[in-house]
């Protein structure tokens, strides 16, 4: 019997890596190897689109989908990893009144922008992972990448923290965005919380926990491909 093909919509909790969540699913479901359409860091939660069977061939296609994140930024503190893993370092620089200051700064970051990825990332540098080099004390110099940020909306703002919703294209690092916002204010900032709520047409409200997913939760390949243009070809043998 052929392995079913399609996608699982997983609500990854904070803690495990995306790979660890997939490994656990592979052991439980015995459907072969799984892929995904964009990793989530261990400290991030939310929607992980898991590819099963022949859907793994669609990885490049589906990874190009627009993504939506809810992010929490903490100001006046920087992080070596750009997130809560740290180590964290207070900057002792004043945090501006965020309610008034956020709008213009966020507006300047919308569109096609050049973004330097985090040193603690999986990008290859001379054949090695950037995070491996960074953990050994050799901070790699990564080149800026062009990414697309469609919108940034302020959900809430407090004295030294803010929650924003980011809609962006593939390859965007929200950790780097937090760093860039902090640098624009001159007081520094790091990503203190992140949740992916949407990936393409899939929403986290339809996702299930990794340890609760079953074969009945598989979104079939025909449903996955429904939004794409279709061409039927007659083939004579």
Image: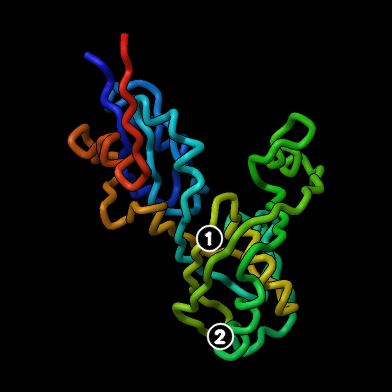
Locate the C terminus by quadrant.
top left
- Mark 2 and mark 1 lie on one chain; the one further toward the N terminus is 2
Identify the residue under disc 1: 168
Q: Residue at x 37, y 43 (%)?
A: 229
Separation of marks 2 and 1 at Cα, in angstroms: 26 Å
Q: Residues within 10 Å of mark 2 (few under 14, many from 20)?
A: few
Q: Give the structural element (helix, strand or loop) at label 1.
A: strand
Q: Is residue 8 above or below residue 106?
A: above
Left or right: 1 as drawn, with respect to 86: left
Q: Give the structural element (helix, strand or loop) at label 2.
A: loop
Q: Residue at x 67, y 57 (%)?
A: 87
State the mark number for residue 159.
Answer: 2
Locate the N terminus by quadrant.
top left
Q: Is residue 140 above or below residue 216?
A: below
Quarter-wise, where is residue 226 in the image? top left
Q: Is residue 170 above or below residue 56?
A: below
State the mark number for residue 15.
Answer: none
Q: Residues within 10 Å of mark 1 (few under 14, many from 20)?
A: many
Q: Residue at x 59, y 85 (%)?
A: 98
Left or right: 148 as drawn, with respect to 21: right
Residue 132 at x, y = what percent?
70, 37
Left or right: 11 as drawn, with respect to 1: right
Q: Is residue 64 above or below residue 151?
A: above
Nearest-to-viewer mark from 2 and 1: 1
Q: Nearer the viewer, residue 181 or 138?
A: 181
């Amino acid at each position: 019997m052929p392995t079913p093909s399609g996608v699982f919509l997983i609500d990854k909790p904070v803690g495990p890596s995306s790979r660890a969540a997939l490994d656990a699913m592979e052991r439980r479901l015995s459907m072969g190897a799984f892929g995904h359409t964009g990793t989530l860091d261990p400290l991030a939660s939310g929607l992980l689109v898991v590819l099963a069977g022949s859907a793994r061939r669609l990885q490049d296609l589906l990874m190009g989908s627009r993504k939506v994140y809810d992010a929490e930024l903490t100001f006046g503190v920087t992080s070596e990893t750009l997130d809560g893993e740290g180590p964290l370092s207070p900057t002792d620089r004043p945090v501006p009144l965020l309610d008034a200051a956020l709008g213009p700064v966020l507006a300047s970051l919308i569109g096609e922008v050049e973004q330097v990825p985090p040193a603690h990332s999986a990008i290859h540098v001379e054949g090695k992972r950037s995070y491996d080099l960074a953990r050994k004390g050799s901070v790699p110099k990564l080149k800026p990448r062009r990414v697309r940020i469609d919108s940034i909306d302020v959900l809430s703002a407090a004295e030294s923290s803010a929650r924003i919703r980011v809609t962006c294209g593939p390859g965007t690092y929200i950790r780097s965005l937090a760093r860039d916002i902090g640098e624009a204010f001159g007081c520094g900032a790091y990503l203190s919380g992140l949740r992916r709520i949407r990936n393409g047409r899939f929403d986290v409200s339809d996702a299930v926990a990794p340890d609760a997913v079953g074969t009945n939760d598989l979104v079939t390949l025909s449903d996955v491909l429904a939004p794409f243009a279709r061409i039927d070809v007659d083939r004579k043998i």
